[in-house]
Amino acid sequence: MIKQEWKENGFVNEPIPEGTDIKAEIRQMCKEKNAIIMAHYYTESDVQDIADFVGDSLALAQKAATTDAEIIVMCGVHFMGETNKILCPDKKVLVPDLNASCSLAESCPADEFKQFVEAHPDHTVISYVNTTAATKAVTDVVVTSSNARQIVESFPKDTPIIFGPDENLGGYINSLTGRNMLLWKGACHVHEKFSVEKILQLKAEHPGAKILAHPECKGPVVKLADKVGSTAALLKYSITDDAKEFIVATESGILHEMQKSAPQKTFIPAPPNDSTCACNECNYMKLINMRKLYNCLKYEWPTIEVPADVAQKAIRPINRMLEISKKLGL
Ligand code: 13P
Ligand code: SF4
């Protein structure tokens, strides 16, 4: 039983007894409870290191859809936990801190999005996975940054499309595909902070460095990049490309896996434009830490719940994404 005093605003705030080998205990609990730990690349390094599976949004959804674990601990943000729960309604899905939101998901309230969709009844609705389950419920097909271009292109060129909520990703896909999708005006508060000036300054200091950017960055930043892609795509490029240095314009948690995978290379985080910090961090992803992970496994709380009527509608566009991705070999 969790004591009420430790059950704090969506996470278990219990201190861990001194001398506890947290890593060993976490692994032991996973074994005993048949639990899998999944983590996004933006979480703390030690959380990524203890996870059974680390991936981008598409890979995490694909893994959830196929795991035979009884408990999924999603070390990431709330919408990732919701996607897992929708895909695995009979499993217990835990997120170590329910406050781990996402500014993109928040920028697209389901009721307002529904009105927008209803105002354009002839449009196909494509939503980025960074949305709440309720927003997915008024969507025709979900995409991630790994498959957005291909899924948009799977529709005939004259199909009128609403794309939400990331205006930057939508604009980027419009520019790649020559489409004119109607864009919801949402944005990620982390990726919006990268500035052309600061990246160019780094490039001047490291002329041989390649620039990597997530498509959630603003257009002028994306234009500077040698490689634009999802976290997994940027990671892959950083491993396989010949360059020795990389300027990385996405959340700085990804540098951990980059550095681990290519220890001989140098990874330079692009800084945000509004502070003197060298790194640009997602405050939501960074809510997930080892103590919360330990407590969440111990108490099997907090769980992610999605109302049945919402889940029933949201599963269709998610499955549609997984089916198209499978067909395309993504
Ligand atoms: P990826 O799907 O590329 O991992 O992106 C998730 C995300 O939240 C980017 O901010
Ligand atoms: Fe959401 Fe941005 Fe954080 Fe990604 S980095 S989880 S889009 S707030």
Image (spheres, rainbow, N blue to C red):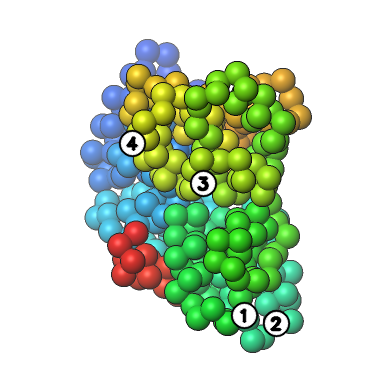
* Residues marked 4 and 3 touching at CB (< 8 Å): no
Residue 320 seen in this snapshot:
yes
**Where does the image place residue 166, in percent across and percent down from the top left?**
64, 57
Look at 74% across and 81% down and name the residue there: 119
How far apart are labels 4 and 3 at the CA level? 15 Å
Secondary structure beneath dot 3 equals strand
Q: Which mark is residue 160?
A: 1
Looking at marks 4 and 1 on the same chain, the residue that comes earlier in the sequence is marked by 1
User: The residue under label 3 is which amino acid type?
Assistant: Val
Secondary structure beneath dot 1 equals loop
Looking at marks 4 and 3 on the same chain, the residue that comes earlier in the sequence is marked by 3
Q: Which mark is residue 240?
A: 4
Looking at marks 1 and 3 on the same chain, the residue that comes earlier in the sequence is marked by 1
Camera-nearest residue between 213 and 325 = 213
User: The residue under label 2 is which amino acid type?
Assistant: His
Q: Which mark is residue 274?
A: none
Q: Residues within 10 Å of mark 4 (few under 14, many from 20)?
A: few
Secondary structure beneath dot 4 equals helix
